[in-house]
Amino acid sequence: MDFWQTHPLFPKLSEWSGILWPHLSWMEKAGRPLSVYLFLLSAFRFSGKRELGQATLFDFLIVLLISNVAQNAMIGDDNSIAGAFVGVATLLTLSWGLNRLTARSRKVRTFLEGSPTLLVYRGVVLPPAMRRESVSDNDLRTALREQGIASLSEVRYAILELDGRISVIRDDARVSPGGEDCVVGEIRAQEPRES
């Protein structure tokens, strides 16, 4: 008898099939991660931009728990190597495809990622936007201080970005004759109308 077949540290030849090949169908191995990815994408998309930018200990624990629950849903009762490769390939392909789509289509990008939100315009806080995005006055003022702003009157635009950060364009920022090309139409459309 061969040493490799009798040694307790090495799997028997009959066990290699279960280690290497999934016992679920290939379609199920690809469909499970796809379903979980799309669910999590929509759940995080609609949880709000500010939630992405403020990672607390609570948020970290939630991400760990979600990953554990999602892992169980993605693999089913299959722990095979080929099954893992199929799941990873499915997720990477989906991510690549969505990145290409969002790079080519503003509508798709806005649907999947949202758009930046104007929080302050020419020194005036916009309360409806603050409420809609769940940004507290304290969070806004903290972000302004972190960028060296002492007074709201110094702010031309404060924008809640897609990643949850608040970016600020100072009122004294120099503007070239071509205009404010960093302030895209999405933000301009949110400016309050002057009466």
Image: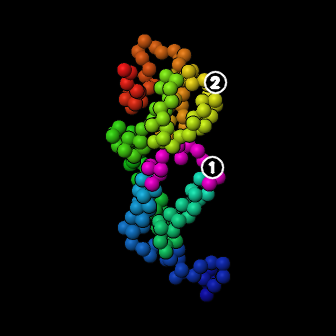
Picture coordinates of residue 42 (x, y %)? 42, 53
Say which of 152 and 54 sits in front.
Answer: 152
**Residue found at the very far front of the displayed protein:** 195
In the rendered image, is residue 76 in sight?
Answer: yes
Name which residue type carries label 2.
Answer: Ala
Residue placed farthest to the bottom in the image? 1
- Which residue is pictured at 50% across the width and 63% down the height? 70
Q: Residue, x 33% and y 40% (percent of image)?
A: 107
Q: Which mark is residue 150?
A: 2
Does 187 sit above or below residue 110? above
Q: Main secondary structure of the magenta part?
A: helix
Q: Disc 1 to disc 2, how far (Cα)?
A: 26 Å
Residue 166 lies, with reference to residue 3, above or below; the image says above
Which of the 4 quarters of the picture holds residue 179?
A: top left
Using the rendered view, name the quadrant where residue 185 is placed.
top left
Horizontal and vertical percent position of residue 58: 62, 54
Q: Are marks 1 and 2 in contact (CB under 8 Å)?
A: no
Segment tinted magenta in the rendering: 43-58
Identify residue for label 1: 56
Q: Residue at x 35, y 43 (%)?
A: 108
